[in-house]
Image (spheres, grey):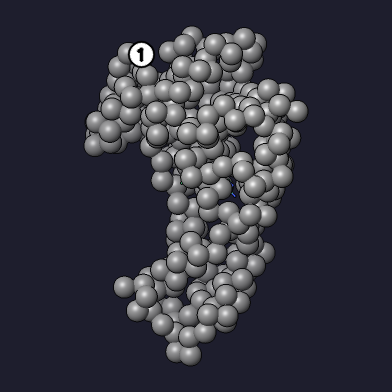
Amino acid sequence: MMEEWRLPGYDEQLEKLEIKLLLEAVYLEYGYDFRQYAYPSLRRRIRRRALLEKQEDISSLQGRVLHDRDAFERLLSDLVIPVTELFRNPATFRWLRERLTDGLRDVSFLRVWHAGCATGEEAYSSAIWLEEEGMLGQARIYATDISRAALNRAREGQLPKDRFPLYDSNYREAGGQSELSRHCEEEEGFFTFKASLKERIVFAEHNLATDRSFNEFHLIFCRNVMIYFDPSLRERVHRLFYESLAPGGILVLGGKESLAFTSHADHYETLSEEHRVYRKIE
Ligand SMILES: C[S@@+](CC[C@H](N)C(=O)[O-])C[C@H]1O[C@@H](n2cnc3c(N)ncnc32)[C@H](O)[C@@H]1O
């Protein structure tokens, strides 16, 4: 369907220029910086948005996005991709629980950062893990994203009932020690995470492309975010994480992400290549 969309006088180089100008306009007008995101995925999403907005080309989409905030919000929601799950990749959470809990227990005030937390399920997963190990009371979880809409949903902490069977199965596979329902209050049509979990999580806006470090962390998760970035932006984000980790701190990446080929690879030891878990060594 997408491939059928051809502009009159379609020219790949021209399209590249139009996308560059659109991203520049978005940055200057709205402050969101997508200029160093991986091009093929950006192009696919921008083309799709142009089609849905019934625009003839990307320059016209640019005009629309600049003059119509709602059109910008629609483009933004195409670009941020807030897809997530509770205990996503449960084997990774099981590995973390089995291998890291004892070491983290020794930290007097544990600080965890979920960078690119989307609607918050990953941060709630950590909160549940730490709560079941009796460590949540001495922990603070910071969960950040660029998407305000995703963060608002994260703060609400609601789980739709139809997702519950998947999340319950993830919870068990991840080594959950009781019942997932024990961590939620049941309401009509959905579950809400208990206040005892919510109060340990700070949800806030933070842009990995432009913002700085804001604390020192013992554990940083950044999963399924950098796959959308180009190599130079990945490099920036790895520097940010390196600067934000305490000595011996742990970095957890997504299944398709790696530290290899970044200039920081030598500053970490690999704890699990399978689960993409690394420890800062210097
Ligand atoms: C696919 S979701 C990953 C969610 C979660 N980490 C997981 O693995 O389930 C990617 C998230 O990264 C966020 N994101 C994209 N660019 C970002 C940036 N520059 N700074 C912070 N978050 C960003 C998106 O808004 C989206 O919520």
> The C terminus appears in which quarter of the rendering?
top right
Q: Nearer the viewer, residue 34 or 189?
A: 34
Q: Position of residue 230 (x, y in %)?
A: 60, 57
Ligand 1: does it lie within 8 Å of the C-beta at label 1?
A: no
Task: Give SS at disc 1.
Answer: loop
For this rendering, which residue is in front, 56 or 260? Answer: 260
Look at the picture and state if 47 lies above or below 139: below
* Residue holding disc 1: 177
| 196 relative position to 62: left or right | left
Above or below for 254 versus 94: below
What residue is rendered at 52% in x and 69% in y?
65
Q: Nearer the viewer, residue 111 or 193?
A: 111
**Residue located 57% across and 80% down the image:** 13
Q: Is residue 211 visible?
A: no
Give the image location of residue 61, x and y in percent. Answer: 50, 74
Q: Which residue is drawn at the image coordinates 49% and 23% (left, top)?
A: 96
Residue 48 quadrant: bottom left
Where residue 27 appears, as percent x and y from the top left, is: 64, 62
